[in-house]
């Protein structure tokens, strides 16, 4: 964005912008001190208004519930990372198995293609996504089998 | 300490732990750098305020609690980053929780019903609704001190979490006019509230 974000600063702080405009403001304020200050002033006004609004006491168990939520998030975060790694790994294998015949890696392709076909025939593609760690080992055993043939 | 950016819970929280004093500046620095103790400190210091912020948008205890926790986890796992240079951590968190609450509210069926009701009303009625949302006299006076044409869009934006596009449609204004009225209204409100604090 050239120039400044002008009134978008206040709209951003109020949460009144659409997703794309929000992203534009966030990118802009990283490099424009003047606009960052304007957003900051607007955010302080929002905090001011919040201070003056009715206060509501949180439930007594709120901290325990937060600890439980953190634990769930931690597990979800771990699963998400494993899923990404497995997806990249399996995707890489499939792409590799589809490589042209005269590739420099033709030799390796001869071992990988049967491994991928073996997984598909054994319907182990879905479990690979579900239990990333264990199935990565299973993938490797398919490689070993293919190599031995 | 309950965690780092990777959310490692390491101790049970107690009322004593929550009452632990934390220095503002140190807490801000630590939170920006995701030091292990900073999430504890932020929760201890601000959870009550932030819960209230969420509650004032959502008007439901369970939703407010979920909203507060979603927002904090989002901030802590780096999907939204805090930088000390951009202002106080307190304001930053208030805005994050409020925005999270507005997003939740936009999705909720309750909001759809409210939209229908307000959409059917004129801008004058929207202005009068300030009194439905503001119990604090000082805040009420500040809102009522705004020019009429700035008050309506600001009320729809702040209290009902509407986007400027929705507000423009509801009030029959152009997008540019809506943006500038909201912006001027908020700036003026900020000046009035600050001046009253100083005086």
Image: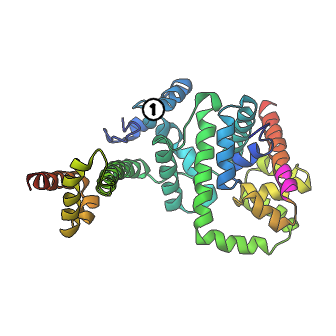
The part of the image, by quadrant, that contains residue A51 is top right
| Rendered-image quadrant of the N terminus of chain B | top left
The part of the image, by quadrant, that contains residue A113 is bottom left
Q: Which residues are magenta?
A: B175-181
Picture coordinates of residue B180, whole percent (x, y)? 85, 49
Picture coordinates of residue A59, whole percent (x, y)? 47, 54
| Residue ID for mark 1 | B34
Q: Is residue B145 magenta?
A: no
Which residue is pictured at 46% across the width and 46% down the height?
B73
Which residue is pictured at 65% across the width and 40% down the height?
A27
Label 1: state its secondary structure: loop
Badge 1: chain ID: B
Picture coordinates of residue A2, whole percent (x, y)? 77, 38
Q: Is residue B177 magenta?
A: yes
Which residue is pictured at 48% across the width and 56% down the height?
B66
Overall secondary structure of the magenta section = helix
- Snapshot colouring: rainbow
Lateral position of residue B101 relative to residue B134, left or right: left
In the depicted view, which residue is nearer to us: B196 or A83? A83
């Amino acid at each position: 964005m050239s120039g400044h974000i002008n009134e978008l600063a206040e709209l951003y702080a109020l949460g009144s912008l659409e997703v794309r405009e929000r992203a534009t403001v966030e990118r802009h304020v990283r490099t424009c001190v003047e606009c960052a200050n304007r957003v900051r002033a607007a955010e302080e006004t929002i905090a001011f208004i919040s201070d003056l609004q009715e206060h509501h006491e949180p439930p007594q168990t709120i901290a325990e519930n937060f600890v439980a939520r953190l634990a769930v998030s931690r597990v979800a975060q771990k699963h998400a990372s494993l899923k990404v790694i497995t997806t990249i790994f399996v995707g890489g294998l499939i792409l590799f198995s589809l490589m042209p015949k005269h590739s420099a890696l033709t030799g390796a392709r001869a071992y990988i293609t049967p491994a991928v076909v073996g997984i598909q025939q054994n319907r182990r593609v879905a479990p690979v996504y579900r239990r990333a760690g264990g199935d990565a080992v299973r993938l490797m055993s398919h490689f070993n089998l293919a190599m031995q043939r | 300490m309950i965690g780092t950016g990777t959310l490692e819970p390491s101790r049970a929280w107690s009322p004593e732990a929550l009452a632990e004093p934390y220095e503002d500046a140190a807490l801000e620095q630590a939170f920006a750098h995701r030091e292990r103790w900073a999430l504890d400190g932020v929760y201890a210091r601000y959870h009550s305020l932030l819960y209230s912020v969420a509650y004032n948008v959502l008007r439901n205890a369970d939703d407010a609690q979920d909203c507060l926790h979603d927002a904090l986890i989002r901030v802590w796992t780096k999907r939204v980053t805090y930088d000390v240079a951009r202002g106080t951590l307190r304001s930053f968190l208030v805005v994050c929780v409020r925005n999270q609450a507005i997003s939740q509210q936009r999705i909720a069926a309750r909001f759809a019903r409210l939209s229908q009701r307000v959409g059917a009303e004129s801008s004058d009625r929207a202005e009068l609704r300030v009194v439905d949302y503001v119990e604090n006299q000082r805040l009420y006076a500040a809102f009522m001190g705004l020019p009429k044409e700035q008050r309506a869009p600001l009320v729809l934006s702040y209290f009902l979490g509407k986007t400027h596009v929705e507000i423009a449609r509801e009030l029959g204004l152009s997008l540019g006019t809506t943006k500038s009225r909201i912006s001027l209204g908020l700036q003026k409100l900020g000046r009035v509230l600050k001046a009253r604090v100083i005086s």
